Every structure is written in C-alpha cells, then in structure tokens.
Amino acid sequence: MKELPSESIDLLLTDPPYGYSFLGKDWDRAVPKVDIWMECHRLLKPGSFAFIMSAPRLDCLSKMALNLGDAGFEIGFTPIFWAYHSGFPKALDISKVIDRRLGLKREALEMPGRQRSALCWGKHYTGRQEVDYTLPASDDAKRLSGAYAGFQPKPAVEVIIVAMKPLSEKSHTDQALKNGKGITWLKDCSIPAADGLGRFPSNLLACDRVFGEDSYMFDLDNFFEERIKQLPENMRGRFPFLFSKKPSKYEKEAGCDLIDPKRWCDDEESVDIPQKRNKVERHNYHPTVKPVKLMTYLTILGSRPVDTVMDPFLGSGTTAIACELLNRRWVGIELEREYAEIAAARISNSSKFGLNFRANSCKTEPDS
C-alpha cells in the first residue's frame, strides 16, 4: 500500500481477518492493526466509503470498529447484516467430551427422516460428512446431555462495517459535487419485488430465502435475478455466480484446476467440528470465501464503473472478480502466496464468460 499514491482509491471493500483464529490459522489470530487502516485511510479519496466484513462476535467486532475509528475513519453508520441459512454449528458437545475422556463408546441413535447429526455439512455442500446421533454413556454425560461449551449458536449472520473517510467539503452534497464521494448508490441496490417496485435497501441482506415470504424485502437472490436479465442471452444460462447461498463449490473453484488440492485444515488435534471432520480436498482451500454476489452488491453500492476498488486482504480474490464483472479497476493485496495463486486463477476465469479481463493487480510474491 505504501507504493500507491494518496487519494487514489474510490472504495475499500475487504474481508479481513476476524480475529478468532478460524481453523487455527495464524493470519486470523488478531484483527488488523490501526496502522494498516491508517494506510487505507491515506489512499482513499475524501468521502470514500469502506465496507469491511467482520464477525458478529462482540469482542472481535468492537475491536475492528475501534481500530477503524482510531485510524481516522468515521464509523457512525449502521452496519449491514448479511443473513443466511447455510452456516453450521461449531459448538462443543460437553456430554461427548465427558464420555471421550472416560474412553466410553456411545450407542448410535437412529433418527428416521432427519440428518444424522446437527453438526454435519449442510445440504449445499458436496462431500459432506455425517456423524451419528449418539446416546450418552456415563452418568455425568447423561446429566449434561444437551449442554454445549459457552454460547456458540448456529451462525446465521455476518456484519459488514460501514466506514467513511471524512469529508473535505462542508456537506455531503458539496463533496458529491467536488469528487463524487460522500454518497452511496442506494437506488442501484434496490431489491426488485413482484409488484414491479424496487424496495429501498435496508441494513439487512438475506440469502437462502431466510425470511420466507418476507425475504423479497432484503433478498440478494431477487436482486440478481433481476440483474441477470441485463446480460446477453447466451450468458444467462451459464453465468455461475448468481444463485449460490454461501459460495458453491463451482464458484469457489472455477479456474483453479491447476492448483494442487488439499484440505482446508490438516490439524487433527483440535476440537471436533465439521471443518476438521471433513476429509475432502479442494482446489480452493481458502476457508472463508465470500459469495461473488455479496461483493458485487457492495461494489455497486459504493462505486461507479471505472472507479478503483482496493482489497488489502484479497484472500481467494472474490472482490477482484466482482470488479471484473462490473467494469471497475481494482487493486488486490494478499500476504499468503498460496491464496494469491488461487486468487489469480479464479480472477482469470472471468474471461470464460465473455467479460473483459484486466490483470490490474494480483502479484504472487510472498510480500504482496
């Protein structure tokens, strides 16, 4: 970032480390420090917005927001909440731990008509690993059956912090007239509805029809079902990124055929959770891939065509893919070489869909 000129970026859109050591990854042990956000602040034009993904866990979320504020960003905006069905529980079953400590084998319990375990992979994932429901074996396990460590409910929402580099002009109107900033393009992000009228965007985005018949008020699926009509007819049927919940396997791995596959996590000694249990190897093994449609929505909300969007935590490249689809220039920075290589492969896949591909930035040097 230090190589880039000041006030050269129109939108900051990123999915940084959340700070809770997801899957034991070293890069996720802490939220980004203030000096990183200060450098982002320097690069943004006055009035430019930043959309920053964050965990809903309060300690991580508050630390992320405080660091942004200390770096000079205005953070007095409501966050955007992204809701979905396809999260899976990661809570530690106390009863199972007790029996495991005692070396006792638990009796499998048949549950006709139900998935074999509440902790299995969701229906949207191929190669899911199912685990039997079991009956507690010891007296202590029976007494604490149904209890889980701490409070870890099934995840169904993530938070997008909305921040802005302070205005250089007296008002938002003056800033918009000066450099087109201090504003978000809410009308372009209205949610289509059956009555033909667009619903004004809210601070809630929904996937998987999580609110049933009321989902049309917030639904990214509705948003993209309307936008796909703007594509050439020969592209509509094969455009891969519109109707996934969390990203499908195809969306994650498109273009990554030459990447050697491996598991998300090879540490066998930590807590028994679905990510650890799954043995499937993937070409895109980044553990926190965001949907292209989510990053596309945020790109539209905060920028115009030919604007420059920056993602200083590029990961497997979803922000850059969204920019490719929307005719935005982009700068992507990724510390881990293996993820940078995955990002380069996924981004280059944009050419398969008749879209302009510009390799604006995707270095694979270790310090990039």
Image (cartoon, rainbow, N blue to C red):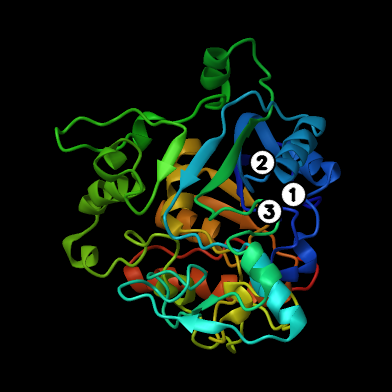
Within 10 Å of disc 3 (Cα), the crowding (few <14, some 14-19, many 20+) is: many
Q: Position of residue 53 (x, y in %)?
A: 61, 47
Name the one closer to the observer, 307 or 15.
15
Which quadrant would residue 317 be assigned to in this image?
bottom right
What residue occupies the far front of the structure in this picture?
139
Amino acid of disc 1: Leu
SS state under label 2: loop
Name the one closer to the observer, 284 or 92.
92
Q: Position of residue 368 (x, y in %)?
A: 75, 65
Which quadrant would residue 52 be assigned to in this image?
top right
Answer with left or right where residue 316 lies relative to residue 190.
right
Residue 327 showing in the rendered view: no
Amino acid of disc 3: Pro
Which quadrant would residue 115 be assigned to in this image?
bottom left
SS state under label 3: loop
| First-in-chain label (1 vs 3) | 1
Within 10 Å of disc 2 (Cα), the crowding (few <14, some 14-19, many 20+) is: some
| 290 over 32 or under it: above or below | below
Q: Which residue is mark 3?
A: 16
Q: CA distance from mark 1 to mark 3?
A: 20 Å
2 or 3: mark nearer the eye? 3
Answer with left or right where residue 30 lies relative to residue 232.
right
Q: Position of residue 286 (x, y in %)?
A: 61, 71
Q: Which residue is mark 1?
A: 4
Q: Which residue is mark 2?
A: 8
| First-in-chain label (2 vs 3) | 2
